[in-house]
Amino acid sequence: MCNDSGSGAGPSIQYQQANSSGAFGSNPVSITSETFYWNYAQPFGGNGTLLGGNYAGYLSTTEAQMNNPNGDCLSCNVGEDPTHVFDFTIPERGIPFGQSYTINNSTPFLFNPSEGKLLG
């Protein structure tokens, strides 16, 4: 879940991104953090500020199509191994994060590329 209001506080949305299994090699990997880069958010109006709110992160394996996931049924994209990997709260005014922001997972996710794509 993330805030997409464009202000320090606002409505919550669910965001999903499917990542190619080929980006991870062929062996299982333990994912212990995620890094978000401002330059990827900039074309969509991102300004280098992490908006205020409560954030929860989940990872799973998915068979969803890379460029055409099921947008009408986001839960349909989630695989059989959903794992709650982090929770954190950002103050209402948000925080600047410069070029990137790394979230350390409270629970690692063991991703096996041979089982599908990574959904985050």
Image (tube, rainbow, N blue to C red):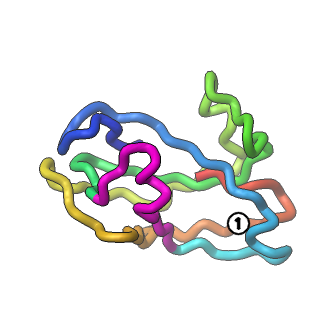
**Residue 64, percent from left and from top:** 76, 41
**Residue 16, percent from left and from top:** 56, 44
- Up the image or down, 37 lies above or below 1; here it is below
The residue depicted at 75 percent of the width and 58 percent of the height is 20
Q: What segment carries the magenta color?
A: 33-48
Task: Report which residue position mark 1 lands on.
Answer: 111
Which residue of the protein is positioned furthest toward the front in this rendering?
Answer: 43
Name the secondary structure under disc 1: strand
Task: Verify whether residue 43 appears in magenta.
Answer: yes
Q: Say what amino acid the circle numbered 1 marks.
A: Phe
The residue depicted at 30 percent of the width and 54 percent of the height is 47
Apparent side of residue 113 relative to residue 7 in the rendered image (left or right):
right
- Up the image or down, 42 lies above or below 10; here it is below
Quadrant in which the N terminus is drawn: top left
The residue depicted at 49 percent of the width and 72 percent of the height is 33
Residue situated in front as seen by the camera: 31 or 24: 24
Task: Verify whether residue 101 appears in magenta.
Answer: no
**Residue 23, percent from left and from top:** 75, 68
The residue depicted at 78 percent of the width and 41 percent of the height is 65
- Up the image or down, 75 lies above or below 60; here it is above
Apparent side of residue 61 relative to residue 7 in the rendered image (left or right):
right
**Residue 100, percent from left and from top:** 39, 70
